[in-house]
Image (cartoon, rainbow, N blue to C red):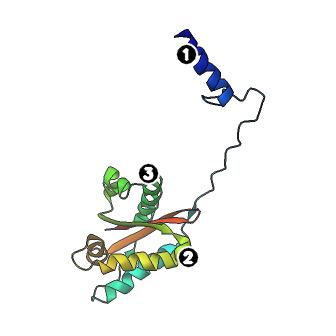
Amino acid sequence: MKYAALVLSLCLTSCGGGRGAGNQGTSPDPTPTPTPTPITATAADLTYCVSVMNTYRATVGRPPLAQDPKLEQIATRAAQQDYLAQSPHQHFIQTGGEGYSQGENEFGTSLSHYGSAHGALDFSIGLFWAEGPSGGHYQNIVNFTRAGCGYYRDGDTIYVAADFR
């Protein structure tokens, strides 16, 4: 048994296994890769998101959604939390829409597929609309009167939340 412990100890030291072992002056610890600062939406992006939904609403005779700054703040927090957790609607479920939002649509995609945040919004909101009247995303766009969008962008990935009231 002592022999097995000695072999394991030598392997961890010489093979680089274990925390801090194996780098005793022979090679430096790798430098951590810096995490890029995520990019948040501009005011124009947030307005654009609601305007795309309003374009679809107009096709079924619904009045425009009012852009709601409080929903934008909630959606921005939701987009970040849900992207980092890789779990759609986690923020909404955990916070009950922060006691204000009553519905939420979310999507994440690669910006390189669409060329811009606006291209990604056009495509994704179009998919929500294409669900038709039996789809929950469609229902959120049609049945509420207020909306706010927020997004979290990390490199080539954009994660968007639209919250409704």
Give the Cα distance between marks 3 and 2: 24 Å
At x 65%, y 30%, the residue is: 15
Q: Which residue is mark 3?
A: 85
Task: Check disc 2 and report its element: helix, strand or loop.
Answer: loop
Give the quarter of the image for residue 135. Answer: bottom left
Amino acid under label 2? Answer: Ser
- Horizontal side of residue 125 vs 115, given as left or right: left
Q: Position of residue 109 (x, y in %)?
A: 47, 68
| Secondary-structure class at tag 3 | helix
Distance from Cα at disc 3 to Cα at disc 1:
41 Å
Residue receiving disc 1? 4
Q: Is residue 47 visible?
A: no
Q: CA distance from mark 1 to mark 2?
A: 58 Å
Q: Nearer the viewer, residue 58 or 37?
A: 37
**Do residues under tags 3 and 1 come within 8 Å of each other at their CB atoms?**
no
Disc on res. 88: none
Q: Residues within 10 Å of mark 3 (few under 14, many from 20)?
A: few
Q: Give the number of the disc on residue 116.
A: 2
Q: Nearer the viewer, residue 111 or 13?
A: 13
Between circles 3 and 1, the one closer to the viewer is: 1
Where is residue 107, by image quadrant? bottom left
| Residue at image location 33% in from the left, 50% down from the top | 94
Question: Where is residue 117 drawn, in percent x and y?
Answer: 53, 74
